[in-house]
Amino acid sequence: VANVSMGANKQQLMKAFIEAESYDGPSLIMAYAPCINHGIKKGMGKSQEEAKLAVQSGYWPLYRYNPALAAEGKNPFILDSKAPDGTLQEFLAGEVRYASLQKTFPAESEKLTRQLEQEYTERYEKLQRLAAQEAAPGKEA
């Protein structure tokens, strides 16, 4: 299982694909890939930049879960993202689907953005705790 974004980290994307391919069983890779329905204000030609901003802002965390690592006594969960950098509002404002809320209901939009920033910070902290756990010896997760 992996969360990836080519625009944010091509090396992490390739590691996820290699790990998924080498795993003897089903694999799932979820990729952040902006589409025309997102309404990217910068234009679809900037979709890689938008994907990078999604990761930096905490909207889309990058991680990999490789059960084969547990057999090696390693934590199978790897967090590849840094902490959210405070640009969530910039990210949200760059897409029509979110910017329309700001334009139509500015107070509600501000409230929801603050709530979202808090939830994404908490989610990141939870992912950090998962990545810091020690693997149980000889036991697959």
Image (spheres, rainbow, N blue to C red):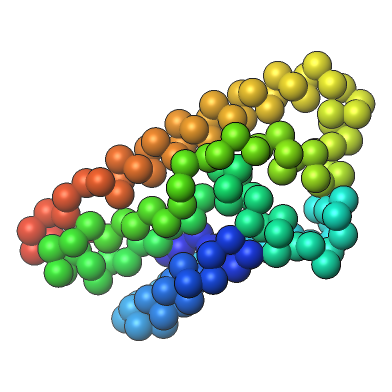
Q: Position of residue 17 (x, y in %)?
A: 46, 77
Q: Residue at x 90, y 29 (%)?
A: 103
Q: Is residue 79 above or below residue 4?
A: above
Asked whether, in this view, residue 88 is left or right of residue 58, the answer is right
In which quadrant will I find the N terminus? bottom left
Asked whether, in this view, residue 85 is left or right of residue 34, the answer is left
Q: Residue furthest left?
A: 137
Q: Residue at x 58, y 48 (%)?
A: 56
Towards the viewer: 69 or 141: 69
Q: Is residue 66 above or below residue 131?
A: below
- Residue 91, can we see it? yes
Q: Is residue 25 above or below residue 30?
A: below
Towards the viewer: 2 or 9: 9
Q: Position of residue 76 (x, y in %)?
A: 27, 60
Q: Residue at x 84, y 37 (%)?
A: 99
Q: Quadrant of residue 24?
A: bottom left
Q: Position of residue 46 (x, y in %)?
A: 79, 62
Q: Residue furthest top?
A: 107
- Residue 60, can we see it? no
Q: Position of residue 18 (x, y in %)?
A: 41, 80
In which quadrant will I find the C terminus? bottom left
Q: Residue at x 54, y 71 (%)?
A: 10
Number of residue marks: 0
Q: Quadrant of residue 106?
A: top right
Q: Residue furthest right?
A: 104
